[in-house]
Image (cartoon, rainbow, N blue to C red):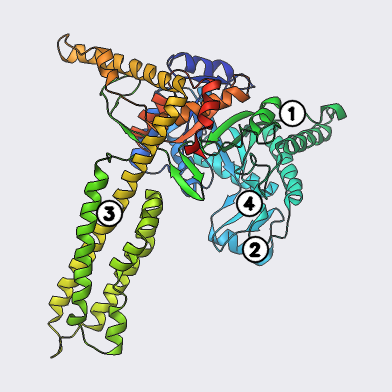
Amino acid sequence: MRLVGRATSAATLSFAQMYPHMRFRQSPSALALSSIGFGAFRLGSKDSVAALVSALRRGVNVIDTSSHFTNGQSESIVGAVIGTLVAGKTVSREQLFVISKCGHILNKETVSHIQQHNSCEGAVVLSATAAHCIAPHFIEQQLSQSLNRTNLECIDAYMLNCPERMLAGKLNGRNVSDVYPFIKSAFKHLELEVRRGRIGSYGLCSNSIANPSAPDFLDLQMCVELANEAAAEVRLEHGEAGLEGTQRTRNQSNFSCIEYPLNIFERDAVESVNGGKVLAEIAEENGLYQLTQRPLNAIAGGAIRCLGDKVTGYHGTTCCPNIEILLIYPSSHTLSDESKITSELSTLFERVTELELQLPSLVGDTNEDIATVSHFIWAQTLSENLSTLISSNAFATQHYIQQTVLPTLEKDIRTLLEENGTAQDTAPPHEILQEWAQQYKESIQNLSELLVNLCKASETAMNREIASVVGAMSPSAVNAWRQAVVVAAADAAAAARTENNGHEDSVADKVDKFAQPPLSDLAIRIVHGALEMKTGGRGGTVLIGMRKGEYVDAAVLAGTGVVAHADDVESAFLCSLLE
């Protein structure tokens, strides 16, 4: 039997009152929603399940998932965790606000069917394994599957996921104006789903909705008007009053929320370049609750910037059970690591070069042998691209190594051994070549690991520089962070009294050990401050990926206490390092 109920004002308020240190926001429908939400994009491992449980037990009551997250596994885990916690009376269903989405198709068979039969008017094929669809019959099917996976009777907010993707792919030829009829048709179906009780409301998740200069920009005000028209048509079809012309520009539908990227680099939603209204203001005027994503994964200068760092502290607090926090997208490398890693890299490059010079003497001298040997030039390839690799983020470098370097190396070594599998009079025994291959493979693997570590150390250095400058320009965010740490340290002190027979260090001494806030905490508080500034103080929920316990620790700390003041937000946005 599915879990009945949906988020209510009274229940979410009672949840908020259980966590007085956490920031909560009141939605236009009077729900009390945590200012930090659990992003369930990579939910799947045992650690991520434990992290979700921890988050819900520590004051997070907003969960963001989607039908395509980990191929539906994310929704299943969300449902299972909620069911377990409700059964154990840790939370009630009505205290939680669950979001899911539809639109992305990552099923090869479905994509193939669309390609062959053009079976979905509101669909576009993006690749052999991906498509996008917001047609009513597809939404109905996807929602049914989401409800089955989550085992919920009602999903609180069901979102269209990036409808601007309808402009891409193999069945394109559309422009933005062509997408709006699909959105209206989808909204009309979602209005019907609200009436059926399968969703509480609906929303729109978009990567382009904040940027009017984007070629795939979606106009939020236009979407509000489409939702009004869709809602009016449904009311008329049910014999109810329609919509007066003067009401068409203000939200009169069950369109309740939007989700979009916002971080200290990508600020289109809160920062106007021409003096006009920005997305956050338009959404607030229309009574739409705002959820933001990617607070610590920025796209800047054509690259992904990971805004994380490491801070050490004290264990055993209620607010933060593990204050030795590895913040989101963490790096365990200190600034002194860079010179050490660089030295080790130099030694390994020499070792790889030495092995590559040995190889011609270990094989024959035929044209085939020469061609095979020519593949083993990774010392040259990696050294020539060293500056590019280091300037990239660690994720991109690791992806390149795992998807390109190591598979190619494995293939070339296999070919080398197969072509020289029999000992010849002019070559050494095959065992010697095998030993060389093993040494070469291990050296490249060690070299690759060091390259990733150097990227992490470089990111740490850059993020600490940004944190230092931005912190100086936003003292309210720094003070808010310090106050949050005081709360955590006070809990640790109470635990220490019990464990150490009354002896403890002062809270002030503990806080003094935090010389500078990590960039991740500053970034989240500044984003919250920007949202408050543009929404008359309402603010919104910042969604953070929390697939590990330490990420929950960091998020809960960032969700504790106040946010950056408006003046400090504006000052921080002037920082040249954030351009």
Q: Mark 1 points at which residue?
A: 251
Report, in whole angstroms, how far the alpha carbon at label 1 lies from the one at label 2: 34 Å
Mark 3 is surrounded, within 10 Å at the Cα level, by few (under 14), some (14 to 19) or many (20 or more) other residues, namely: some
Mark 1 is surrounded, within 10 Å at the Cα level, by few (under 14), some (14 to 19) or many (20 or more) other residues, namely: many
Q: In this view, does 306 lie to the left or right of 13?
A: left
Badge 1 element: loop
Badge 2 element: loop
Q: Name the residue under label 2.
A: 170
Earlier in the chain: of badge 3 and badge 1, it is 1
Disc on res. 449: 3
Question: Is label 3 or label 1 in front?
Answer: 3
Earlier in the chain: of badge 3 and badge 2, it is 2
Earlier in the chain: of badge 1 and badge 2, it is 2
> Picture coordinates of residue 564 (x, y %)?
49, 22
Q: Do the residues labelled 4 and 1 touch (CB within 8 Å)?
A: no
Question: Is label 3 or label 2 in front?
Answer: 3
Report, in whole angstroms, how far the alpha carbon at label 3 lies from the one at label 2: 38 Å
Badge 4 element: helix
Q: Do the residues labelled 4 and 2 touch (CB within 8 Å)?
A: no
Report, in whole angstroms, how far the alpha carbon at label 4 lies from the one at label 3: 36 Å
Please say if 517 is above or below 370.
Answer: above
Q: In front here: 328 or 238? A: 328
Q: Name the residue under label 4.
A: 165
Report, in whole angstroms, how far the alpha carbon at label 3 lies from the one at label 1: 53 Å
Earlier in the chain: of badge 4 and badge 3, it is 4
Q: Is residue 117 left or right of residue 471?
A: right
Number of marks in the image? 4
Report, in whole angstroms, how far the alpha carbon at label 4 lies from the one at label 1: 24 Å
